[in-house]
Image (cartoon, grey):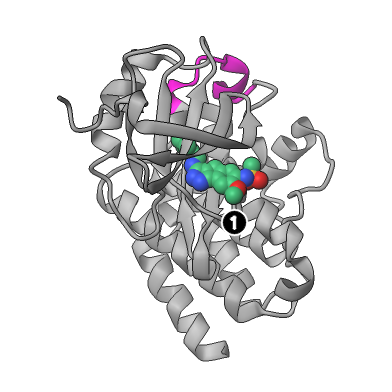
Amino acid sequence: HDKWEIDHNELMLLDELGSGQFGVVRRGKWRGSTDVAVKMMKEGTMSEDDFIEEAKVMTKLQHANLVQLYGVCSKNRPIFIVTEYMRHGSLLNYLRRHEQSLATNQGLLLDMCIQVCKGMSYLERHNYIHRDLAARNCLVGTENIVKVADFGLARYVLDDQYTSSGGSKFPIKWAPPEVLNYTRFSSKSDVWAYGVLIWEVFTCGKMPYGRMKNSEVVERVQKGIILDKPKACFKEVYDVMKKCWAPLPESRPSFRILKDTLLNVSQGIL
Ligand SMILES: COc1cc2c(cc1NS(C)(=O)=O)=CC1=C(NCc3c(C)cccc3C)N=NC=21
């Protein structure tokens, strides 16, 4: 019995948590006691066999700031992807719901960014590129634990509106110039997206570039125009964002460096 294969008879599906373009996510219980989340992959949205191959690798990526993949139910269709359950949902929704209390708590906002950085530093160390890092793809658990989710899944999406940089669903606002021009993903393109994620956190979930059209955002990014400093954000934190948005990927810091930088900023200003 393959370790990553979960017997769907051992799953009890409970309330619906949300639904995205790849399917519905429901809360569940595994073997009667373990809280899980189950993503039921809408048929035809994903190259399933490739993903199942990848699931074997993903179950080996284990870190306190990565949403743990428990396994897949791949014997039936739709396939189920089973992960640990994060009781406060997506970071983006959490920021928006708790704006009042979070807006004045820079320490907590910075701590959330550092947790994401630790998860991303682990992926970087394992040469694993996320490709779709954003606050919507991070999840919040108990005691303000923040974890990176959905890492690497973008490669298996069949909808080319989502995968090609010209597509209507492509996350343009989190993409650096080399991804917009050549779809060249790397851990340094993840670093650019991480800079936008810090901006999302310090604006408590605002949409980057507001309601600006994708074509206008692309033009600005190509010209080197970057997002403004959020009101409630220390200058030192904005300086880190600007490092993440260096036009050339090789000029951007690694997540390993970013982690040390942010920890110093945290000690310095708090
Ligand atoms: C409590 O609220 C929630 C909790 C979760 C959640 C969404 C919400 N609600 S919401 C929509 O944000 O408002 C999604 C998950 C999840 N994993 C998702 C996942 C699976 C199952 C498979 C592959 C990739 C991923 C990321 N673990 N816990 C939660």
Q: SS at mark 1?
A: loop
- Above or below, 17 against 98 in this view is above
User: Camera-side residue: 97 or 53?
Assistant: 97
Residue 23 is situated, as x and y percent measured from the top left of the image, at 57, 24
The magenta region covers 155-166
The residue at the far front in this view is: 32
What residue do we see at 59% from left, 63% from top?
Answer: 242
Q: Residue at x 59, y 56 (%)?
A: 88
> Does 24 appear above or below 211?
above
Instruction: Please state which of residues 134 and 12 is positioned toward the viewer in this rendering.
Output: 12
Question: Which quadrant of the figure contains the C terminus?
Answer: bottom right
Q: Position of residue 144 (x, y in %)?
A: 54, 68
Q: Which residue is mark 1?
A: 88
* Residue 18 visible to the viewer: yes
Magenta stretch holds residue 119: no
In this picture, residue 99 sits left or right of residue 186: right
Q: Position of residue 183 (x, y in %)?
A: 50, 28
Q: Is mark 1 within 8 Å of ligand 1?
A: yes
Coordinates of residue 200 in the picture (x, y in percent): 67, 57
> Is residue 160 highlighted in magenta?
yes
Ligand 1 falls in which quarter? top right
